[in-house]
Amino acid sequence: MKSQVWVLGLYMVNIKDSLKVKYCGNKSLVDLKITASSQAQYLGFIFAKSKREVRPEDLKSWLEHVDVRSKKLVGVFVNSAIDEILSVVSKVPLSVIQCHGTESPQMLTEIKTVLNREVWKVIHHSDNSFKHMEDYSGIADAYVIDSKVKGMWGGSGEVFDWSFIPQYIKEAKRQGVPCYIAGGVNKDNLKELLTFQIDGIDLSSGIELNNIKDKEIIKKIEEQVKLYDTGSRS
């Protein structure tokens, strides 16, 4: 997203907001220690069937050993009932509920009303899926655009067709909410992705080595993010 400020009261310029970063799929105390010491604003945890699924009881235990006060915790759910989400929130301090399935606008509204938390909606890319965002206008607090892979809800490491990104950004801006890009984002393709002037990135497999979050990979990611944030303001 971009904000506008007056310069010397004479003319208006656009200033690029800092890129938001979410490291998702933290599945162990080791993972959490690594990402908690990163520059990411958001840390994600999956509470759905996945190779990166975590139990809320385990996460609660990990949080006793890791300082995450500078982060917002994001819980990833797939078509979960309100009671299931409430059960997780009663154990761990989630700031954001990320709906990663086929949840309806009515379901998101109910989650926001009952839990009083930000709710993000994942849009799985297809040629016309950006139009699906219109259904959640005024409800979703942010969008995460992810790859659509048969038999998987996410975490595939597959990249979708980035030529559609401007359409997603346009619709998110119309709604006045951020648009994050997920799906196969990594240190090697991040530079290209940042040319689209996106609001944020969501990485999971892209910061792993041998299925464990990796400090050196994260360092390389954050070097690129820093260059982006301190680069040309246009």
Image (cartoon, rainbow, N blue to C red):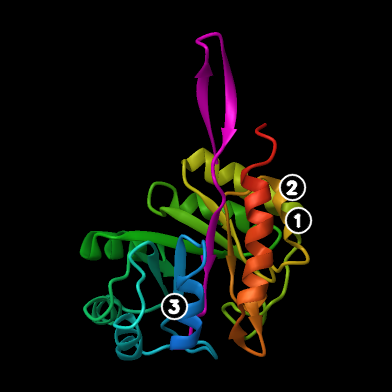
Location of residue 150 in the rendering, given as x and y in whole percent from the top left corner: 66, 82
Indicate which disc residue 45 carries: 3
Residue under the image location 45 percent in, 72 percent down: 36
Mark 3 falls on what kind of element? strand
Asked if disc 3 and disc 2 are in contact, CB closer than 8 Å, the reply is no
Q: In this view, does 57 lie above or below 220?
A: below
Which residue corresponds to mark 2?
195
Residue under the image location 70 percent in, 51 percent down: 194
Magenta residue check for 169 = no
Mark 1 falls on what kind of element? helix
Q: Which of marks 1 and 2 is in front?
A: 1
**Residue nearest the viewer, comparing 24 with 219:** 219
Q: Which range is magenta?
A: 1-28
Question: Crowding near pointer 2: few (<14 within 10 Å), some, many (20+)?
Answer: few
**Amino acid type of the residue that numbered disc 2 sits on in the rendered structure:** Thr
**Amino acid type of the residue that numbered disc 3 sits on in the rendered structure:** Phe
Q: Which of marks 3 and 1 is nearer the N terminus?
A: 3
